[in-house]
Image: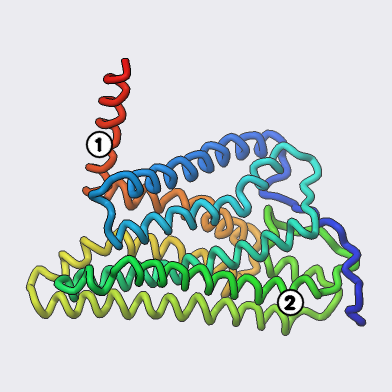
Amino acid sequence: MDGGNQSVVSEFIFWGLAHSQSVQVILFVMFLVLYLLIVSGNIVILVLITTDPHLHSPMYFLLANLSFVDMWLSSITTPKMISDFLRENKTISFAGCMSQVFFAHCIAAGEMVLLVVMAYDHYVAICKPLHYFTIMNLKRCTGLVLTSWTTGFIHGISYIVVIVQLPFCGPKEIDSFFCDMPLVIKLACIYSHYLHTLMNADCGVVAVTCFILLLISYTYILITVRQSSKSGASKALSTCSAHITVVMIFFVPCIFIFVWPLNITWLDKFFAVFYSVFTPLLNPAIYTLRNKEMKNAMKRFISNFLHSKGTSL
C-alpha cells in the first residue's frame, strides 16, 4: 500500500483498564491518590537535596535528577488515564498520541542511562573512595546527566520519526490506557511485523546494554570490596541495596513492555501500570525510608520549618 499522506486518523480511542463504571470510579480515586503521592514524594526529595547542605554531594545530585525524571515518567500517561476514568469516550488526538510515544521512550531511555550513571557513582564511592570527589566532580556529574538526557532524546526521536510517517487510515482503537508503541504500530495500514521487530530490537539495544553495564558494575563492586574486607560484601550490598532494588523494579516491567512484550492483554496492562505508576512511587519511598541521611534531612527540614513558623508568630 502506498504510504503517501494516508494518516487520515485524527484521534485514537482507548479501551482503558475497566469497563464497569463503578470500578472506574474506584480506580479514579486510587490512582489520583497514588499520583499525588508520586508528585509530592519526589518534590520532597528535590526540596531536601536542594536546600540541605549535608546532601550537596554527587550521589544526591544524581538522586535529585532521578526524582525529577520519575515525575516526568509518571506524568506522561497517568493524568490522562485518571481523567479518562470519568469519561465515556476515552479519546486522544493523533498529536497527543505521538507525544506519548516520544516522551515514554525518551524518559525511559534517559532513566536507564541515569541508573547506569548512579551505579558508576556507587562504584567510585566504594572502590575508589580517596578519589571520589575528584572523579565525581560537578562538571563530570553534570556531563553524565546531560548524556542520559541526550541518549533519551535521540532514542525517542528515532521512534517518532518512523511512526509519524506510517499510514493510519482505518482502525483507531487501542486496548490500553496510553499509546503503547506496539499497539499503535498494529493500527498502521501496512504489514507491520518487520517494523515491530525492528522497534523491539532498538529498545533491546538500549535496555539490555544498560542492564548488562549495571550487572557488571555491581558485580565488580562486590568482588573488589570482598577482596579487601571479609565484611566488605555485606557492607557493599547494604550500601547499594536501595539502588539495586530500584533497578530491578524499573527494568523488569520495562523489558516486558518495550523489549519482549508477552502479547497477553491483561499482563501488558499490569506491567504498564506498574512501570508508569508504582515505579515512580516506590523510588522515593525506597530512598527515603532506607536512607539515614535523607531521614535526618527530613527531620532538620521539619525542625527548621517549625522554628521559623514559631519565630514569625
Image location of residue 111, percent across then percent down: 47, 65
Instruction: Judge by depth and name the residue closer to the eye, 59 or 111.
Output: 59
Against 185, residue 75 (above or below) is above
Instruction: Judge by depth and name the residue closer to the eye, 176 or 214.
Output: 214
Label 2 sits on a secondary structure element that is helix
The residue indicated by pointer 2 is 162
**Image point (60%, 67%), residue name:** 105
Image location of residue 149, percent across then percent down: 51, 68
Q: What residue type is labelled 2?
A: Val
Against 59, residue 296 (above or below) is above
Label 1 sits on a secondary structure element that is helix
- Quadrant of the frame with the N terminus: bottom right
- Please indicate whether residue 235 sits to the left or right of residue 21 in the image: left
The residue indicated by pointer 1 is 299
Q: Do the residues labelled 1 and 2 touch (CB within 8 Å)?
A: no
Q: Which amino acid does label 1 sit on?
A: Lys
- Label 1, residues with CA under 10 Å away: few <14, some 14-19, many ≥20: few
Against 272, residue 212 (above or below) is below
Among all residues in the image, which is located at the extreme top? Answer: 313
Mark found first going from the N terminus, 1 or 2: 2
**Image point (52%, 78%), residue name:** 206
- Quadrant of the frame with the C terminus: top left
Against 306, residue 287 (above or below) is below
Give the Cα separation between the discs numbered 1 and 2: 50 Å
